[in-house]
Image (tube, helix red, strand yellow):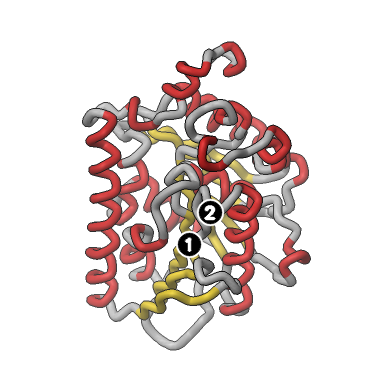
Amino acid sequence: MEDWRKLGKEELEHQYSPSHWSHRMDKDAVIEAHVKEMTEGASVGRTNLSRIMARTVLNVQYGDSDSEKMDLYLPEGESTKFPVLVYIHGGYWQFLSKEESGFMAAPLVSHGIAVMVMDYDIAPKGDMDLIVAQVRKSIAAVSKLYPYNTGIYLCGHSAGAQLVAMTLCTDWTEYEATSNIKGALLVSGIYDLLPIIDTYVNDALKMSLEVALENSPMQYVRKMNAGTCQVVIAVAEHDSPEFHRQSQNYFQCLKETALGASYVLVDGTDHFNVIEKLFQEDYVLTKIILKMILDQ
């Protein structure tokens, strides 16, 4: 893929419009189908959780704002000595919420893994600095709520992958917490925000060049404070060339650090169903999460 700086605005908007690249349906239908799939998946997931006697705790405040809430899906029993998977939703920092994000909980909770999904202030209400801080704050809150956790693992999709990557370079002393992050799965993410500054994606975010740089994970790879955290970078086969370039570049930079990093191309998927399938226990990314956590 050529340098993104050589691409015109129209081509950049095309590259950063994931719906334009789906092999399954047209650009409008795939977004509509994605929202429907996530919403229905979350509903079915809660039903399945009740069948396995999981504990569901909704709308837990992780901060002072009314919007700073998280949902917790906990394994059966009273013990709090369990691993925690934190899922950060995508939506280009502008739509989706925790209400559609519990779809992957059942196969994880059935293996004794707690799941947390959270809300952040989507744009235009929330700007990038605020959103990154809220994600960090929610993870610190989980660490304090379950101090005996056996490890915190992160999964983020699209914009959520950028937020997870920013979390990996957090100074947790600022949040009076120890994160105990042991693994992260980043799916079809954006790790350099500069290419989207002049696209429609930034209309609601209104990022300046400075803000985009400050919130680009690529800027922090050599400053990451993630210990022995295992990082998996995944990208859908039918993501755009720019999404592939971003994932490959970020992976190559991670490989040059002491972090254990691996790269997965998910065949037969686009930007949307690559994450929708996480409710399936035999799906490749679900198996990666389970192996990452259960083999510790």
Is label 2 in a helix, a strand or a loop?
A: loop
Q: Which residue is mark 2?
A: 125
> Residue 128: image x %, image y %?
61, 47
Q: Is residue 136 left or right of residue 157?
A: right
> Residue 36: image x %, image y %?
24, 50
Q: Is residue 93 left or right of residue 166?
A: left
* Residue 179 image label: none
**Is disc 2 surrounded by few (<14), some (14 to 19) or many (20+) residues within 10 Å?**
few
Q: Quadrant of residue 34?
A: top left
Q: At 42% from the left edge and 33% from the top edge, which residue is drawn?
A: 265
268 above or below 46?
above
Q: Amino acid at mark 2?
A: Lys
Q: Quadrant of residue 51?
A: bottom left
**Is disc 1 surrounded by few (<14), some (14 to 19) or many (20+) residues within 10 Å?**
many
* Residue 119 image label: 1
Q: At 58% from the left edge and 79% from the top edge, which residue is drawn?
A: 145
Report, in whole angstroms, how far the alpha carbon at label 1 lies from the one at label 2.
13 Å
Is label 1 in a helix, a strand or a loop?
A: loop
